[in-house]
Amino acid sequence: MRDFSSNHEALSINTATLRKQWPLERIVEECARRGIRAISPWRDQVAQVGIGAVARQLKDAGIALSGYCRGGFFPAADEAGLARAIDDNRRAIDEAKRLNAPCLVLVVGSLPGALDGAPVHHDISRARGEVFEGIAKSLEYAIEADMPLAIEPLHPMQAADRACVNTLEQALDLCDALDPERARRLGVAVDLYHVWWDPKLERQIARAGRDRLLAYHVCDWLVPTKDLVCDRGMMGDGVIELKKCRQWVEEAGYTGFSEVEIFSDFWWSQPGERVLDTCIQRHRKCV
Ligand code: ZN
């Protein structure tokens, strides 16, 4: 297993971690100042600055991407909605390409309307079918663009509104069905916040292997957790066995960045400098 204790070469910052404090340009600046070598930005943050300016700034700062957030949200109430989702995913693939991302992360979606508190229907199998079709269609375009797609399984507490793919096993079944050649075109983003509890985690990470492990996201699971989305913990403050899990992904062949992704009302209320410095420190000590 790689030694993270003496440097933070493998650290990437998911820019949602600092979205309430700083615009993307400032996040890139502050990361560069600290020798952080990669980020994973969100589409809305990129759009705010303009993708050309972001691409230039990253190049000048020598900062790479560990992923691009995000595509997905395939299920829709009607045909027109399904088509809009495919178009939007194509745009996301183009943006990811422009920024040289190693993959586009997919949060696949679930019951249409649920995110706004008004699900149009309750048929999660239908949503899963639409996710399958949506990934299949996006994959054709992604292969042409040479942009790998990384399915991120989300914790089952988000099965209604954000993702009807909730375990690594389920995500890998999709990968096997849609990309049996395992040519690093379709894989998974392993976000420990979502999958740490899974009794099959070790086995499924081994099954994923190097070909399918496209991204690795870390934070911690707080006890108690007070919010389903915005109460993620800083590494070391919760119960996830971070080192054990990293050993599993590295044994499976993963050599990429370890991306800190913390949606947290608490950490969003702290000065950005403190958040970044704490990420570096905890990444060395706890990840
Ligand atoms: Zn994630």
Image (tube, helix red, strand yellow):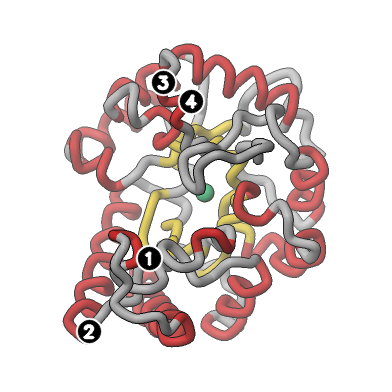
Per the image, the residue denoted by label 3 is: 269
> Is the residue marked by circle 2 packed among few (<14), some (14-19), or many (20+) residues within 10 Å?
few
Looking at the picture, does residue 18 appear above or below residue 174? above
What is the secondary structure assignment of the residue under circle 4?
helix
Tell me the distance, in whole angstroms, between the alpha carbons under discs 3 and 2. 39 Å
10 lies above or below 94: above
At x 59%, y 31%, the residue is 11
Q: Which mark is residue 78?
A: 2
State whether residue 214 is above or below residue 269. Answer: below
- Specify the label residue 10 is tagged with: none
**Foreground of the two, 120 or 132:** 120
For the point 42% across and 17% down, which residue is it? 272
Which of the labelled discs sits on residue 266, or is there none? 4
Q: Earlier in the sequence, mark 2 or mark 1?
A: 1
261 or 64: which is nearer to us? 261
Q: Assign a secondary structure to mark 1.
A: strand
Q: Which of label 3 and label 1 is nearer to you?
A: 3
- 265 displayed left or right of 144: right
Q: Mark 4 and mark 2 in contact? Answer it, CB < 8 Å.
A: no
* Quarter of the image where the C terminus is located: top right
Q: Earlier in the sequence, mark 4 or mark 1?
A: 1
Residue identifier under label 1: 72
Q: CA distance from mark 2 to mark 1?
A: 16 Å
Q: Are marks 4 and 3 in contact (CB under 8 Å)?
A: yes
Question: 268 or 282, which is in the foreground?
Answer: 268
